[in-house]
Structure formats: C-alpha cells, structure tokens
Amino acid sequence: MYQNVFQTLAIETKLLSRQALQNEKWQEIGCFFIQNYVEQLSKAENITIGHIKGLIELDEGNFIKFSSVAADRPVNVEILNSQGNSQEGRLTFNAIVANISKETNLTCFHMALERTCSVYGLMTDYKETIHDDGELAESEEQPCPVCHGHHHQHDETCGHHH
Amino acid sequence: MDQPKLVLFTGFLGSGKTSLLLKCAEYLAGNKKKCAIIINEIGEIGIDNLQMKKLGYDVWEIFGGCICCTLAISLEDTIRQLQEKYDTEYILMEPSGAADPSALYPTLAHCGFTQQKIKNVMIMDPTRVEMLVAVLEPYLEAAIPLADLAVINKIDVATAAEIEQSEQVIRQYNPGVSIAQIDVNELTANQIKDMLK
C-alpha cells in the first residue's frame, strides 16, 4: 500500500570507543544518535516519518533497541541488560521515511553519526561519503585511521580526534 | 494436527506491533504454549527479527518485499511448512506497517485461515492520530474495518484528546469493534488473553 511511498535507509556500522563503556552509556549514545537523526530529518520539508529503528549489539549477547516516530517524542528504548561493558557497539539502523531523497536521508544520517562520534569520542567504520554534488560514492582516498575521514566532511583539521 | 490460532498484529509503522507481539510471545512461552512468529519488515536489514532472535525466539522472516503482494507465495509456503512440520499452537504474524492488511486475507484463506479463524489485533498510535487522518486515510479505511480488536497503544504518553480522537477514528470505520487502551510496557495478563482468544 505504502511500500513505494516510504523509502528505507538501512545501514550497518560499528561504533568504537577507546575504552569499554557501560551499557547504560551505549543507551545514552544510541538515544542521542537517533534523536539527532530525527531532528535532522525534521528540517526537511514535507517528510513523513514512518519508523526509525536502531539496534546496538554489545558484548556478551547484550543489545539495545531504539525506536522513534517523531522529533518531539522521546526515543523509545528497550534494553535487556543494563549491566556490562563494551568497547564496540554494532549499530544496525533502519529508517522508513516518505518524501525524502536518499541523498538527503543519508546526509541526515551522516550528520547525526558525525555529531554522535564527536560528542562521545567514538570512531566508526562507516565509509560512504556524499560529494558536494550529492552523488553517493565510496571514499577513494585512504581514510584517517582514527576517524576514517567521514566524521567531519567540512573539518579538514581532523582536530577533535587527534 | 489441529490448526494453529493465527493472530495478526496490524497497524501503521511505529504503532507498537513488535512490542505487543513480543509481550504475547512471552506470555505464551510462559504458559508452555508453542508459537511461531512470522515477520515481514521493509528495509534491507531486519531489526525486529534480530531483536527476537536475540531474545531466543524462532522467527520466520520474510524479506525482500511485501507479504501482501510480491511475497504472498513465500508467506503461503512458510505457513504450510509450519502446519506440516511443527506442532504449533499459535502463529503470531506481523505484516509490515506499510502494507494493506486486507491483501493478506486471500493468501491466508488459501492456507485454510478464513477470516473467522484469524484474530486481527489492530494497533494505533494515538500520538500520531492527526497525521494518520491527514495523510494516511486510505490506510485507516483499509485496516480498521478488519480489526477484531482495536488497541490504542502509548496511553502513557498520549494526551486525553489524542486518545479520544483515536477512539473516534476507530469507531468511524469499525463501529462495533472492541477497543483496548494500553501501555504496552504495563500490560496485564487479562489484556494479553483478550488479544489471543
């Protein structure tokens, strides 16, 4: 019915911290990321959010699920075990949104990911970049080994990680 | 082998279908009832099925399209396998929230599930009722009349006006349907029983 109206953006990436973080911290990080993404989305005109979902898999089989349907509502969180520590969070992200181009959607994702990594001092293995003309492409240059070059498209100094 | 009870969890994207399905699955597992879960998510990566598998449930996932149209054969095949190979008492099915649930019924009927043998639990998010009415009226017209039980979810965060408007919208399309108001995180055993009976 609306399968062709709502576009999906599905991304898997890793979030890496220099030190192990408590599960509750990962929960905070996930909420921050989803909230940021939804806020970025809301700046686009006429979009309709279907459902935004994220799942962060942590060590020892722990995971946290996030979901959101609107920027003015809190991110819903399901956490199985708030105890535990992980240095790596494997993020699975799925956004279902109408009236948005994939480029704009990806830009929103990038910005939210970049901000999240910047605020929480995380690295990610996410590689896709958007050129100025909006064309999607894999990064051709060797990425910075710390930030992988995609946290700060407009920040040539790479300052916040080094 | 007796035919399993088929419970459909329908409702628009983000209404709380997966959370409610999981509560029902948890209840059934706690009462030693065998249930199978069929999920059809849109998107290239399934999050709900990943969550359910991590919780230890055996999930039959149908990806790559919609079970209402392009994947109807996959759905039929999945249900037949469940009926033939497993002694399942309940099938809990969650079609994509972007799908027209009425398109499911012919396939289900082909598997022996006539409308009388299906329990359709239709879930509504009252916090988005205005948007649903303004933008997605065809969905409401298609989905609500099929409901055997209408569930207004998220009453912990919705305003009284949003809940009332949701009830009015449900009554508009399905005047006789039972309506339950729930917070999926605070469900009682009786509320779950109502959904499964």
Image: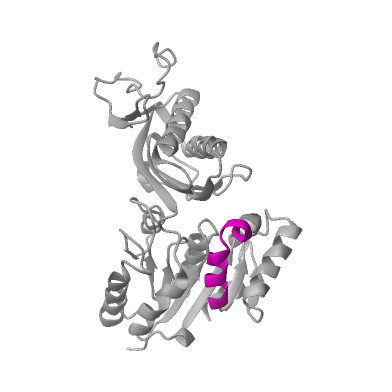
Q: Is residue B30 magenta?
A: no
Q: Residue at x 40, y 21 (%)?
A: A153
What main secondary structure does the magenta stretch of the protein show?
helix
* The quarter of the displayed image where residue B89 is located: bottom left
Q: Is residue A30 left or right of residue B153?
A: left
Percent coordinates x, y for residue A135 in the rendering:
33, 31
Percent coordinates x, y for residue B124 in the rendering:
59, 64
Q: Residue at x 35, y 69 (%)?
A: B69
Q: Quadrant of the N terminus of chain A?
A: bottom left
Which of B123 and B144 lies nearest the eye of the viewer? Answer: B144
Percent coordinates x, y for residue B184 in the rendering:
59, 61
Q: Is residue B140 magenta?
A: yes
Colouring convention used in this rendered image of the protein: one colour
Q: Is residue A117 left or right of residue A38?
A: left
Q: Is residue A84 left or right of residue B197?
A: left
Q: Is residue B18 above or below residue A50?
A: below
Which of B83 and A153 lies nearest the eye of the viewer? Answer: A153
Residue B173 seen in the figure: yes
Residue B30 seen in the figure: no
Q: Is residue B40 left or right of residue A79?
A: left
Percent coordinates x, y for residue A26 in the rendering:
47, 37
Q: Residue at x 35, y 78 (%)?
A: B107
Q: How many marks do you count on the picture?
A: 0
Magenta region, residue range:
B132-146
Which of A56 and A43 lies nearest the eye of the viewer? Answer: A43
Furthest residue toward right: B160
* The quarter of the displayed image where residue B188 is located: bottom right
